[in-house]
């Protein structure tokens, strides 16, 4: 049974194809034993419909065994079934929005196969953790139950693994708050006074655009979530009540009220029980450095000195170790564009999942995909593949740069 087909409740117009083996069973957790057949052949199943999602599958070279206990789990071998998740651009944007990193956009544009990504072990581990947290009703008895942070060298695939986990959660009927770039939460638009909390700065441009896209993606779920806190938007007089929904709140947003509504949205998010909640934050360590703004109320303040906890949007999502989301968790990924040392001071090691660079086997899978996609005319020789892998130290981003030379 394929990875997604075995764990997702799918809409009628989306189909998944894959091998008869998977590291995940129907309940979305690792089974007792999974065996995969050693193979180097490329297998493809094509579905001709207007809204297809396909999986291109490769077997691992080793047997994968995992054990599950009530509190512990052990993956005894590192290999898992590999699959390529192929989405159309429309499907990706409907689930995750339009914003992409430059390198990811570059890959999609040049290969011209929609939104196709390789499912790797970190994505499976993240989904396994999400499933376990849901199974324990998001009971949080230690910091490791609040969040998971995907870390690794730049270009290893952290953002891709995060996006894949967010997409899985969407298909599993979670309410997903996806922040594809934390940098935009601390360096986007003008600032203004925030009446609810004078210590914070309102970010109307950022929050208005975020709310608009969030409603477009999640309107059906939002209409099922009743408001649970009491408040009033002073500028418009809009008042909450138990017969109103989160959709009613967010769809009432105007530019000048966006920050107030975003503030109450986070309070309501903490209390959501109708759906499991995932907050997915890419480039999270940006929250642990000063923003590019200065303090407008402090004449001695310089640009690039305003702490992120003074910005409304960042302040609501920065503290992932005590986020107060009762029916959900946070998964974040890091970036190497800015230092991580301040984040490491706060996030315990047990909350960090390393995303490794490509093995040479994964590089071969990528090359096979590029040949099948007709981006590459033919596969390089075994010696060339090994040379590329060594030259790039297995880094997927650097390998992609080398493979572009062959195009």
Image (cartoon, rainbow, N blue to C red):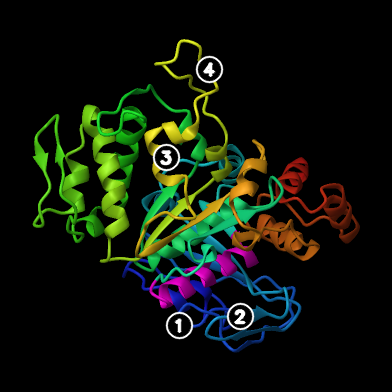
How many marks the image carries: the answer is 4
Q: Which residue is mark 4?
A: 303
| Element marked by disc 4 | loop
Residue occupying the point 50% across, 61% down: 165
Q: Which residue is mark 3?
A: 315
Bounds of the magenta segment = 118-137
* Residue 132 on the magenta span: yes
Q: In 3D space, how far apart are the residues under numbered discs 1 and 4 (Cα atoms)?
A: 52 Å
Judge whether residue 238 can be spotted in this image. yes
Tell which circle, 3 or 2, labels the residue nearer the N-terminal end. 2
Q: Are marks 1 and 4 in contact (CB under 8 Å)?
A: no
Categorize mark 1 by other alpha carbons within 10 Å: few (<14), some (14-19), many (20+). some
Q: In 3D space, how far apart are the residues under numbered discs 2 and 1 (Cα atoms)?
A: 17 Å
Nearer the observer, 140 or 21: 140
Q: Nearer the viewer, mark 2 or mark 4?
A: 4
Q: Which mark is residue 73?
A: 2
Q: Nearer the viewer, mark 1 or mark 3?
A: 3
Nearer the observer, 392 or 366: 392
Q: Does 86 sit left or right of 275 as displayed? A: right
* Residue 9 on the magenta span: no
Q: Nearer the viewer, mark 3 or mark 2?
A: 3
Judge whether residue 17 can be spotted in this image. no
Tell which circle, 1 or 3, labels the residue nearer the N-terminal end. 1
Q: In 3D space, how far apart are the residues under numbered discs 1 and 3 (Cα atoms)?
A: 37 Å
């Amino acid at each position: 049974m394929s990875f997604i087909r075995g764990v997702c409740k799918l809409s009628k117009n989306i189909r998944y194809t894959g091998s008869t083996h998977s590291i995940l069973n129907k309940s979305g957790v690792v089974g007792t034993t999974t065996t995969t057949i050693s193979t180097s052949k490329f297998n493809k199943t094509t579905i001709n419909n207007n809204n297809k999602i396909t999986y291109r599958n490769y077997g691992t070279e080793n047997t994968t065994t995992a054990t599950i206990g009530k509190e512990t789990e052990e993956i005894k071998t590192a290999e898992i079934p590999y699959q390529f998740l192929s989405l159309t651009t429309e499907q990706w944007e409907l689930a995750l929005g339009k914003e992409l990193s430059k390198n990811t956009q570059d890959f999609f544009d040049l290969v011209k196969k929609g939104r196709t990504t390789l499912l790797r072990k970190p994505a499976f581990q993240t989904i396994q953790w999400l499933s376990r947290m849901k199974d324990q009703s998001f009971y949080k008895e230690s910091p490791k139950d609040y969040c998971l942070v995907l870390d690794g060298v730049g270009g290893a695939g952290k953002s891709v693994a995060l996006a894949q986990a967010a997409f899985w959660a969407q298909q599993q009927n979670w309410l997903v708050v996806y922040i594809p770039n934390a940098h935009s939460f601390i360096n986007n638009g003008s600032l203004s006074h925030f009446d609810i909390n004078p210590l914070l700065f309102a970010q109307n441009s950022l929050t208005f655009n975020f709310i608009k896209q969030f409603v477009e993606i999640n309107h059906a779920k939002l209409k099922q979530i009743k408001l649970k806190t009491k408040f009033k938007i002073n500028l418009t007089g809009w008042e909450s009540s138990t017969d109103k929904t989160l959709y009613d709140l967010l769809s009432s947003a105007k530019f000048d009220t966006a920050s107030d509504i975003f503030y109450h949205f986070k309070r309501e998010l903490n209390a959501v029980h109708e759906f499991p909640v995932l907050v997915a934050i890419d480039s999270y360590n940006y929250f642990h450095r000063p923003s590019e703004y200065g303090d407008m109320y402090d004449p001695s303040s310089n640009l690039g000195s305003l702490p992120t906890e003074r910005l409304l949007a960042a302040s609501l999502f920065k503290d992932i170790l005590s986020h107060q989301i009762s029916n959900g968790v946070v998964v974040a990924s890091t970036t190497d564009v800015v230092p991580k040392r301040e984040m490491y001071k706060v996030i315990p090691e047990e909350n960090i999942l390393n995303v490794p660079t490509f093995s040479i086997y994964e590089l071969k899978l990528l090359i096979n995909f590029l040949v099948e996609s007709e981006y590459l005319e033919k596969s390089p020789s075994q010696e060339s593949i090994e040379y590329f892998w060594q030259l790039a130290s297995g880094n997927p981003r650097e390998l992609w740069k080398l493979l572009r030379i062959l195009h």
